[in-house]
Amino acid sequence: MSRAPLIIALETHDIRFPTSQELDGSDAMNPDPDYSAAYVVLRTDGGVDGHGFAFTIGRGNDVQTAAIAALEPFVVGRRPDDLGALYKEMVHDSQLRWLGPEKGVMHMAISAVVNALWDLKAKLEGKPLWQLLSEMSPEELVDLVDFRYLSDALTPGEALQILRRAEPGRAERAADLRANGYAAYTTSPGWLGYDDDKLRRLCREAIAAGFTQIKLKVGADLDDDLRRMRIAREVCGPGFRIAIDANQRWDVGAAITWVNALREYDPYWIEEPTSPDDVLGHATVARALAPIKVATGEHVQNRVVFKQMLQAGSMSIVQLDSARVGGVNENIAILLLAAKFGVPVCPHAGGVGLCELVQHLAMFDYVAVSGSRQDRVIEYVDHLHEHFVDPVVVKNGRYQAPDAPGFSAAMRPESISAHTFPGGRVWAGGEVEEGAA
Amino acid sequence: MSRAPLIIALETHDIRFPTSQELDGSDAMNPDPDYSAAYVVLRTDGGVDGHGFAFTIGRGNDVQTAAIAALEPFVVGRRPDDLGALYKEMVHDSQLRWLGPEKGVMHMAISAVVNALWDLKAKLEGKPLWQLLSEMSPEELVDLVDFRYLSDALTPGEALQILRRAEPGRAERAADLRANGYAAYTTSPGWLGYDDDKLRRLCREAIAAGFTQIKLKVGADLDDDLRRMRIAREVCGPGFRIAIDANQRWDVGAAITWVNALREYDPYWIEEPTSPDDVLGHATVARALAPIKVATGEHVQNRVVFKQMLQAGSMSIVQLDSARVGGVNENIAILLLAAKFGVPVCPHAGGVGLCELVQHLAMFDYVAVSGSRQDRVIEYVDHLHEHFVDPVVVKNGRYQAPDAPGFSAAMRPESISAHTFPGGRVWAGGEVEEGAA
């Protein structure tokens, strides 16, 4: 690569979709989300831009956007050469660090900017991000990671070993991905706002579409959950994997009681049974509910909490999120931790553009980190993909390996302008009913 | 009380002090803080205002201020009657919750607004906050707490028992506080930026001023720390409590090694040895270093992490912070957890106005929760108090019980206007050298 272009501007957009009108995305904790993106574009003097975003569910997307704007001094005037160094500069800035540290709004802002830098870098290299990462040397990958607070569980030396172990089969696995894709599961049947007929129909459609796992939201009403699980199990048949997701609804004791009541319908995993901060609570739940697996991660704030959950046996499925921890770099740390502890990664997706992003991380994991697709599936939700320039392609229940250069993060310009809050056409033009946002 | 007045406006101020110029506040992680307040005023139609703030150390204070402004719809048009309900509405808002949950910028914003509501309520009742809280019934206090995610460690019934157990001696302890105050310790001698002569002089001054404990920042350079600890121990004499504070500088193994090297100088507690998110790491450090105590809390994000640290034996000193968790309400939960586990609370203070706030919480704890001052001290740093309408009064090493109605949170109007960033006199008028903020 010739010298990378200079980043000359950081541009933000507050983008919101009025999803609360359709009850898409409704669960026990989030009854009426308006899926939103605090969106960032890094403009360069070379004509190629990097795109990224933090996903939120409506109110507060303006705060998230302001946090991204506060990172402008870290990237404008810089080149996307050493993304390990740029990432660490942002995370370690002593004054900004006080606002977390490494959690919440400020950390999600770093995530958006880091991911935009990777989108830019992958475009400049002319490769989809999963391929760009998969072709880096173990040493280069280790340099991207911030090992602070990890050394009692994972050292740089151990990370190198993991990556070197996976080196021999890289080309073969990349070819396999291009030929066969990566398994997906679908959450589309399981939103709480849907009636039984819709649930039944969507379960049938999921099976017909080739999915081998679905997920149901639970936790609002036990009788409803028993009925919905029974219906799903009837339609899907025994042995079909049905995961359930409580979205942090319960205390530790309630989680155990509730899931035990659903046990007769053979849930595959229980997702977010309680607070994402509760390492010890998740461990208690996991011990009580085994062999039902405990899955969590979409709200786990950073690598330090993932580390502990793996140390304590709190999770048997790592659900990393592309845009909550510190972007690609911190997710490499999380993939390495998962590989060290031998726990499969099944990324969180859905929302706005999360499917587009996480497919790259899961595919990189397969090619260059864990080397395995055993018990690994990427979440798939069939909403809002039409707003992206390079939307995911899911065929016969499998994500197809992206070809286009970049991180698949760019939204279509007309979608950005129409959904800009509050001035865009969708919000200002009377298309949204009273009550949303 | 007659009907509470209506809140008619939420006003924010981005206030910053150029403290980095003097190296006040410098430690191993925060070399050049500009102590700042994202400040909020709740205006009412009754002429009485409520004041609150989140403390930051410079960059990002604008983001913090924007987050506070996003809470306007929760308080404008409301009356400060039921502060349990108002607090829970903000914390449980499903869309804003996504930005945490209950951590980072959005949670600190809730803290600022909740504390401003308490400042307002206490002024309306004509009492200092510690007294207002100390005169509430156990049932009223329990209603202020959000027990979600706590029930595996503390139930509402257990909280009631704790509060009822402390009821009999309330009046006596309040009188004791008014007569004798509450013990303080001072961090002023221990900042990393000070030379040995200044350290020696400030240690002597601390003893002369009546303090029975000091604290030294450590973690940047072991040789320096050995020399500084030796000097402090020489000046203070054997038996005098010298705490040390690493401000999250180390990984778990390094924390153990470093503090063991300082053990000959008898450190009383090691504060923030590693990531504030690392429940298991702190527990490992605590086991390895006993009988040296482990203290943490100023960056512990919420009651769920405090709960686990108490469950796991990660901390033997609870350093709650007035403005990081969800304000007074969540701090009541933390005081109750500490009482349940029998661990003393020694609040974090310093910064801007943190001394002013935490004194109320520590005094309330003594009167109505733990009922004890055994091994309990409030941090004291002698900076920036002159900017407050009702600054703390520390005499002979003891905080004097505040008399003025409210939460002591209000800054002087002229201090607000002079330090407003970037337009205030201090910043715009050329009083600040190049480089700060």
Image: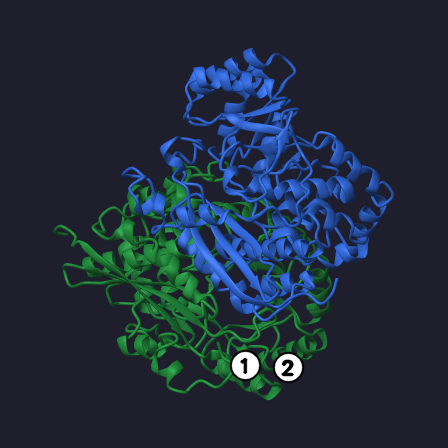
Chain colours: A green, B blue
Q: Residues within 10 Å of mark 1 (few under 14, many from 20)?
A: many
- Picture residue at 43% right of the left edge, 77% below the top: A382
Name the residue: 44% across, 21% down: B222
From the viewer's perspective, tell me whether residue B393 is left or right of residue B374: left
Q: Which residue is mark 1?
A: A203
| Residue situated in front as seen by the camera: B210 or A134 | B210
- Image quarter where the N terminus of chain B lies is bottom right
Q: CA distance from mark 2 to mark 1?
A: 9 Å
Location of residue A428 by image quarter: bottom left
Badges 2 and 1: C-beta atoms under 8 Å apart?
Answer: yes
Q: Describe the element under mark 1 as helix, strand or loop.
A: helix
Image coords of residue A274 (percent x, y): 63, 59
The x, y position of residue A373, in whole percent, is 43, 60
Q: How many marks?
A: 2
* Label 2: element kind: helix
Residue furthest to the right: B168
Residue, disc 2: A231
Dot 2 or dot 1, earlier in sequence: 1
At x 24%, y 53%, the residue is A76
Q: Chain of mark 1?
A: A
Between B303 and B331, the one lying in front of the other is: B331
Q: Amino acid at mark 1?
A: Cys
Compared to residue B62, the image places residue A268 above or below, namely: below
The image shows residue B211, relative to residue A56, as above or below, that is: above
Q: Amino acid at mark 2?
A: Ile
Label 2: how many Cα within 10 Å (few below 14, some 14–19, many 20+)? some
Q: Nearer the viewer, residue B109 or A278?
A: B109
> Which image quarter holds the C terminus of chain B?
top left
Residue A256, percent across and down?
71, 60
Q: Tell me whether marks 2 and 1 sit on the same chain.
A: yes
Residue A210 placed where, x, y %?
45, 77
Direction from residue A352 to residue A75 in the image, left or right:
left
